[in-house]
Image (spheres, helix red, strand yellow):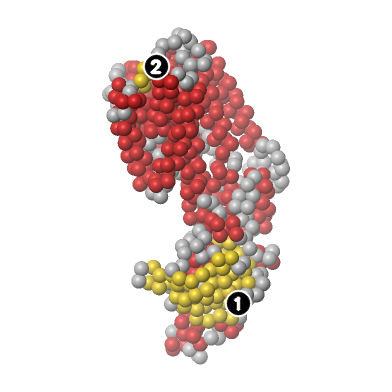
Amino acid sequence: MSTDTLLTVANVTRRFGGLVANSNVSMTVHRGEMLGLIGPNGAGKSTLFNLIAGTFPPNEGRILFEGQDITGLPAPARCRLGIARTFQVPRSFDSMSVLDNVMVGAFAKVPGSHAARRTAIETLDFCSLAHRTEASAGDLTPPEKRRLEVARALATKPKLLLLDEVMTGLTPSEARLGVELVRKVRDQGVTVIMVEHVMEIVMPLVDRAVVLNLGKVLAEGKPKDVVRDDAVITAYLGERHRAA
Amino acid sequence: MTTDVLPFPPATGLLPRRRNQLLVAAAVFAAIALIPFLVRDVYLQNVLVLTLLYAAVSQSWNILGGYCGQISLGHALYFGIGAYATSVLFVTYGVVPWGGMLVGGVLSAAIALLLGYPCFRLKGHYFSIATIVIAEIGLVLVHNWDFVGGALGIQWPFGSDSWWTLQFARDKVPYVHLALGLLAITWFVTFLIEGSRWGYWWRAVKDNPEAAESLGVEIFHSKMAAAAVSAFFTAVGGSFYASFLAYIDPESVMSFRFSLLFALPAVLGGIGTLWGPVVGAAILIPLTEITRSYLGGSGSGIDLIIYGGLIMLVSLAKPEGLLSLFRRKPKAEARS
């Protein structure tokens, strides 16, 4: 294993009852890279995402983070190791202020409230949410809520950030700001895995794309190669559009 | 918009907002300490003692129910453990109530952890139902346990007035100050928790457990810690109540009614807030005592009907409790 491998997913299978959501999936993520996880609905993207975040364990296979086997580790322990995530449907702590939300994340690494507040304020500033510090999280607009999700995850000082459809439902101008933020995060040296539906956003942004279909890895490579892949076009558009 | 957290918070010391809360608390508690010197009527002093006691125990309940979001309707169990531990130790073994308070508190915290182990695997209403059932089992056990007096209960011996044995037959004023001290301590503990990592974690667990887990919060440990602290101070309240009554039996310290009376002030005043339980108790307890003395008899349940009405009113009109009436709304900003 090369030293710059951050995450290894090895032959992972996850079943829900009779449904095989991920079947023998393998992939590696390099330190500092931005990886897109794409595929049509029901391809198993969210399942793989949740397996990496530790929401539930795989039935078979192993997951390694910085060479350490984390297959059996629950989500909080993975967070402390340096894996942070956002949720597809934002899950803010609505009875708390924006600052308090981000402080919860900061407490993952620092025990003192002063240090946590400082981290949170810096992170909010980084995510262009400083003007909403005192607002109640429940009062945020949908794009602000997505920013809050990112800020909260970043406050845990992650090495790997998992973004679950952070651009979904944004207007084109909001999405442009979102892309800017994700680029800034990567420039900080954080490795990013994005699950995304919107191809025209994800493709220019990522270094590499992994395409899932029916729970299996269909293709993997540079974005411009992946979109020309026959199997990928068939999976998305059906047999008729192949090589059109 | 306040700027006490922007742009650079102090590296040490209290935030201005927190310091103000402490000053307000000191002023309020000091003012309450003077009341018994102005109001000499023993009946009213009695009402004041009960109000302060319920405020303190409701604040303890609030630690688990309000901050951590685990609605217990079985806190009468911990209250009873405190009352019984203190009474048995004092009457049978001659240990002063101060020791009984500590023993009862630690015992309750230990039992809360023991019960939390299975119960915190239950969510929402199922957890609440389990707490009711467990408290009722405790009540039945005590009823049939001769060592602690069974259904007859325990009568404290009469002695001279003493801060050592917490017996004051002639003058109620020391009880007012004891109950006030208990309230001040539970308030201050809650204040400390609110500003600490635990406080943030507990509120995160209440608001959204899945998101909390993703941010490194150990949900089960958080609930266990909240339950232990909450049970400890509830039991200390029970200890005080036993010395105040100088006679306890199962119904008078462990009936389901108490579990309700600990939860309701917090719900009425504002669940998960520092002052909610105090405000709630200041309204509910005098109301109960006054309806009781005017309408006669404690068994009529009129007070509970009034509670029910109040709670329905609050949950329909102001689900966050009465305190939310006074909270300044953050300015509505233009939405993009």
How many residues crowd mark 1 within 10 Å: few (<14), some (14–19), many (20+)?
Answer: many
* Residue B7 visible to an observer of this rendering: yes
Q: Using residue A179 as the reference point, say whether residue B206 is left or right of it.
A: left
| Dot 1: element | strand
Residue beneath the point at 48% across and 20% down: B96
The residue pinned by badge 2 equals B156
Residue beneath the point at 46% across and 37% down: B110
Give, as a three-letter code, the residue at label 1.
Answer: Arg
Mark 1 → mark 2, Cα distance in angstroms: 77 Å
* Callout 2: chain: B
User: In the rendered view of the protein, which quadrant contains the C terminus of chain B?
Assistant: bottom right
| Dot 2: element | loop
* Callout 1: chain: A
The residue pinned by badge 1 equals A208
Q: Position of residue A122 (x, y in %)?
A: 68, 53
Q: Position of residue B160 (x, y in %)?
A: 47, 9
User: In the rendered view of the protein, which quadrant contains the N terminus of chain B?
Assistant: top right
Image vertical order of residue B244 relative to residue A224, above or below: above
